[in-house]
Amino acid sequence: MFARAISAVRGTIFLLAYGLFTVLIFDLGTRLAVWPAVHLFPNRRRRIIGGWFYFLGNATLAMARAIVGVRVVRRGRLPAESCVVVMNHQSLLDVPLAASSVRGTQIVIPTRDRYRRWIPGVSPIGRLSGFPYLSQRAQASRAEISSLTKAAEDCERGETTLVIYPEGHRTRDGQVEPFMKNGLRLILKRTTRPVYLLVSDNMWRSRTLSDMVVRFAGTTIPLVAVGPIARPEGQSLDEFIDQLHARLIDALAEIRQPPLDLPAGVA
């Protein structure tokens, strides 16, 4: 009982610290430093935003390590060039995990439309970065299709790395949910960039803010990059997406097998 209370206190301190970081560093830094910089140096826009995302992701993980003892154990690396990254979706920490893994290019994440405005940090950086905003309706609007197409074309030109959570929602039981194929299908039609999987685990019990208060402390998060995964000649896009889904399930099962090789790269 005492240990659980200490864990809850540490989790609460982390959320308060991250809230201050979001308002004072993430949000104000984006508005007052990054936004002017990309307008002053438009030719370096992608590099500036990409570096900012990389800093934000690593700063978040550093706070989690320092305050609540969270460890990230990495295996494999994403390339420093543009690619398409398919990641499983377990928690609110998935975006910082992805941001800390993308080097050399700017990250772009298709995002729910409700995050377009009024969310400190998240809303301004998403608009500045050109995130495609999606309503998750069964039938995408013309504007949504256009924004996804542009994101895929930017990736194809080598300007960005696209990170996609095709499950659409955070899992409740830690397993990989069925993919929402429409967005991924459109992206893969428009870019021939290599496809990687980024697989994490052990965060599904901390999928919400309230969960993170009591279950976040002391978590070890394996984070594995798998790829590149090539689409076999003659294989349809839907078959390839099914293959990615199966590979993601297999990779998750594999990292759950003990022992976990902690010295491989603890962040």
Image (spheres, rainbow, N blue to C red):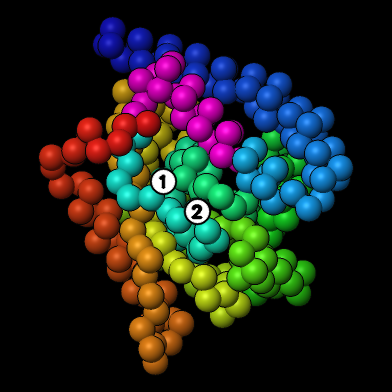
Report which quarter residue 137 is drawn in. Answer: bottom right
* Amino acid type, mark 2: Ala
Seen from the viewer's position, the closer of residues 190 and 263 is: 263
Identify the residue at horizontal 40%, vertical 34% (top origin).
206
Q: Which residue is labeled 2 in the image?
A: 80
Q: How crowded is mark 2: few (under 14 residues within 10 Å), some or many (20 or more)?
A: few
Q: Which of 105 and 199 is in front in this view?
A: 105
Q: Please indicate, yes or no, whether residue 69 appears anywhere in the rendered image.
A: yes
Q: Could you tell me residue 234's position as x and y percent?
A: 39, 92
Above or below: residue 157 compared with residue 69: below
| Residue drawn at (31%, 23%) of the image | 218
The disc, 1 or 2, on the residue closer to the chain's N-terminal end is: 2
Residue that appears at 46% across and 82% down: 237
Q: Which residue is drawn at 38% across and 66% down?
A: 228
Does the magenta-highlighted stretch encompass residue 198? no
Left or right of 79, for residue 218: left
Quarter of the picture containing the N terminus is top left
The CA span between labels 1 and 2 is 25 Å
On screen, 172 above or below 83? Answer: above
Q: How many marks are shown on the rendered structure?
A: 2
Read off the magenta span: 53-71
Q: Name the residue under label 1.
A: 90
Task: Name the secondary structure under disc 1.
Answer: loop
In the displayed structure, 20 sits above or below 172; it is above
Query: Judging from the image, what secondary structure is the residue with disc 2 in?
Result: loop
Mark 1 vs mark 2: in front: 2
Residue closer to the observer: 72 or 134: 72
